[in-house]
Image (spheres, grey):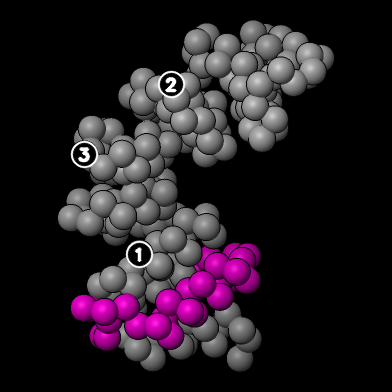
């Protein structure tokens, strides 16, 4: 049995436990799967979530591993996560959402979530789908609290104002310059190309 299969089996051994307290063995196994990476680990984590092998407080660790591995979850699972009472579950659910029709209206609702992290993750998820509803939130975030995730998400919905801000970040934030330039390159419009070229020529401010 390979390492990935052994870790999945370890999680399954404790199925039905952990509704009130996280099972340490499951948490450790999920962390190890995220560390191993790759498609096999991603499929294992997806099965663990879909089959409800991990429940209760341990679910957040499963979702964090899924997000790190780039796992997309089925629509019915995503909907239940986006409606969850715990904000950390809603936030992680956003990170594991793909372009599922049933999830889109829920993500739009979560743009106004009382938890800022949930609202940010909802905006990022919608941005990755190319949904313009996310632009105002992403624009505010890229101005006030830019991050690689926000920059990546805004590229699919970027307008002129977004492009200018991305160019400014590329010049003034060495830690985020690569992300901003990659976003401009992915937009690919003549305006984005010009801003990216100018940012590459100028030394960091």
* Residue 119 colored in magenta in the image: no
- Circle 1 sits on which residue? 60
Query: What residue is rendered at 61% in x and 84% in y?
Result: 3
- Which image quadrant is residue 203 in? top right
Query: Which quadrant: the N terminus?
Result: bottom right
Q: Position of residue 145 (x, y in %)?
A: 46, 30
- C-alpha distance separating marks 3 and 2: 19 Å
Circle nearer the N terminus (1, 3): 1
Residue 93 marker: none
- C-alpha distance separating marks 1 and 3: 19 Å
- Residue bounds of the magenta highlight: 16-44
- Circle 2 sits on which residue? 139
Q: Secondary structure at mark 1?
A: helix
* Residue 38 colored in magenta in the image: yes
Residue 114 marker: 3
Q: Position of residue 87 (x, y in %)?
A: 26, 52
Using residue 10 as the reference point, say whether residue 116 is left or right of it: left
- C-alpha distance separating marks 1 and 2: 28 Å
């Amino acid at each position: 049995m390979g390492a990935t299969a052994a870790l999945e089996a370890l999680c399954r051994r404790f199925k039905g436990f952990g509704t009130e307290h996280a099972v340490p063995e499951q948490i450790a196994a999920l962390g190890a799967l995220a560390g191993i990476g790759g498609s096999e680990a991603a499929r294992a984590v997806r099965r663990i979530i879909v089959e409800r092998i991990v429940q209760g407080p341990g679910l957040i660790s499963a979702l964090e591993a899924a997000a790190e591995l780039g796992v997309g979850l089925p629509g019915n699972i995503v909907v239940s996560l986006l409606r969850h009472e715990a904000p950390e579950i809603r936030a992680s659910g956003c990170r594991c959402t793909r372009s599922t029709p049933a999830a889109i209206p829920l993500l739009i609702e979560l743009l106004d979530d009382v938890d800022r992290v949930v609202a940010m993750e909802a905006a990022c998820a919608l941005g990755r789908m190319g949904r313009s509803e996310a632009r105002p939130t992403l624009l505010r975030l890229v101005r006030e609290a830019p991050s690689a995730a926000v920059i990546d998400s805004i590229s699919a919905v970027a307008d002129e104002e977004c492009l200018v801000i991305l160019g400014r970040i590329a010049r003034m934030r060495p830690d985020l310059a690569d992300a901003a330039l990659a976003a401009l390159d992915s937009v690919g419009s003549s305006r984005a190309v010009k801003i990216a070229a100018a940012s590459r020529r100028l030394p960091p401010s």
